[in-house]
Amino acid sequence: MEGGKMRALIFPEPWHVNLLHVDIPNPKHDEVLAKIEAVGICGSDVGIFEGDHWIVADGPGGHGHETGAIAIEVGKDVEGIYEGDHLARMGAGYAEYSTHVNVVGHGKDEKELKLPIVRNDMTVEEISFADAVGCAYNCYKRAELERIEGEKKAVILGLGPIGLILTQILRNNGIEVAASDPYIHKRTLAKKWGAKIFDPNQFKRANHGNYTVVNQIKEVFGEVHAVFEMVGKNETLLQAIDLVESGYRVMVFGAQKMQYIPYVNCRKKGVELVYPEAMVNSKDNEDYWLPALDIIAGTNGYKKLDTESLITKRITLEEAVNAFIYYDRERWIKIIVEPHRK
């Protein structure tokens, strides 16, 4: 592979993405060169492209972190990984090949010096969901719902891929779920997995006065022990604080650069705002790569996750350029880029 060229997406500045031919990276003695077979477009990638995310990823392959890959070359000091192995947690994945390792989803790989994870019991496309599943599982764990006795109830605001994965995880753990999202195909999936769904588009002033989707959720579903804010807007953060029962937690996972917290609302209810760090449980100093992979595969006591229903379409690197430029939040759930497909 030395001296060869590969195709890769590069994100040089907001609202610009280019497909270039660049050098294939040469693995060092402690690195693995991986062939990227699948990489999911994450909301954080779209945010980086649009310039409203805090992460900067302007090298070949961008921030592409939802990867499924195959080991092509293995450095002489790497143990336990062999050519042909299926690999999780590769980074810089909008490229045909990569040596970058994605540990937590936002740039700590160089500090951690970790290796890819081998999972030959899974397809590379299944593996590409591990980062998103780890994030959803971290949201679930940080809510600490296991501390509550009796019936447990949660609300999810925003049914992007992680919100939909979280719906499955919560339901698989016996938790009653209500979910709100403006797009019907996302609500339909949540309903398929057992959530009670609510349409925020229904509530227009001419028809409902000041009665909102929050009022409806409270009336139909009741106050809850956890609300998961997965949108990244102040409007939904306010809704989450309104919905949660006094003394319980709002998990703030939607990404935005600045939030305005209503002090009085939070103080009067004693609300806890918790910010899960990607797939790392900062409280327990634990990452969830291995549980995420087990959840996808349905191994080690976990119920197998339905990832196929999340995939809207599979595209090439060339098609990915326009996918970023014209990203359709309304119609798409998960777009899988296949860098080697022509």
Image: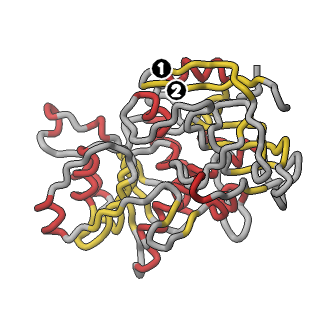
Residue at image position (59%, 38%) is 64
Q: Residue furthest right?
A: 83
Question: Mark 1–mark 2 contact, CB under 8 Å?
Answer: yes
Mark 2 or mark 1, which is nearer the start of the sequence?
2
Residue at image position (71%, 28%) is 339
Q: Nearer the viewer, residue 171 or 128?
A: 128
Query: How many numbered dots are placed on residues in this image?
Result: 2
Report crowding for label 1: few under 14, some 14 to 19, many 20 or more residues within 10 A (C-alpha): some
Q: Amino acid at mark 1?
A: His
Residue at image position (11%, 61%) is 264
**Horizontal and vertical percent position of residue 126:** 71, 47
Residue at image position (63%, 60%) is 289
Q: Quadrant of the N terminus?
A: top right
Q: Say left or right for 301 vs 272.
A: right
Q: Which mark is residue 11?
A: 2
Q: CA distance from mark 1 to mark 2?
A: 6 Å
**Horizontal and vertical percent position of residue 178:** 39, 55
Q: Nearer the viewer, residue 162 or 66?
A: 66
Report crowding for label 2: few under 14, some 14 to 19, many 20 or more residues within 10 A (C-alpha): many
Look at the picture and state if 149 lies above or below 107.
below
Q: Amino acid at mark 2?
A: Phe
**Horizontal and vertical percent position of residue 219:** 25, 58
Which residue lies under the disc numbered 1?
A: 16
Q: Nearer the viewer, residue 48 or 338?
A: 48
The image quarter in which residue 97 lies: top right
Q: Secondary structure at mark 2?
A: strand
Q: Secondary structure at mark 1?
A: strand
Q: Say left or right for 238 vs 43.
A: left
Q: Which mark is residue 107?
A: none
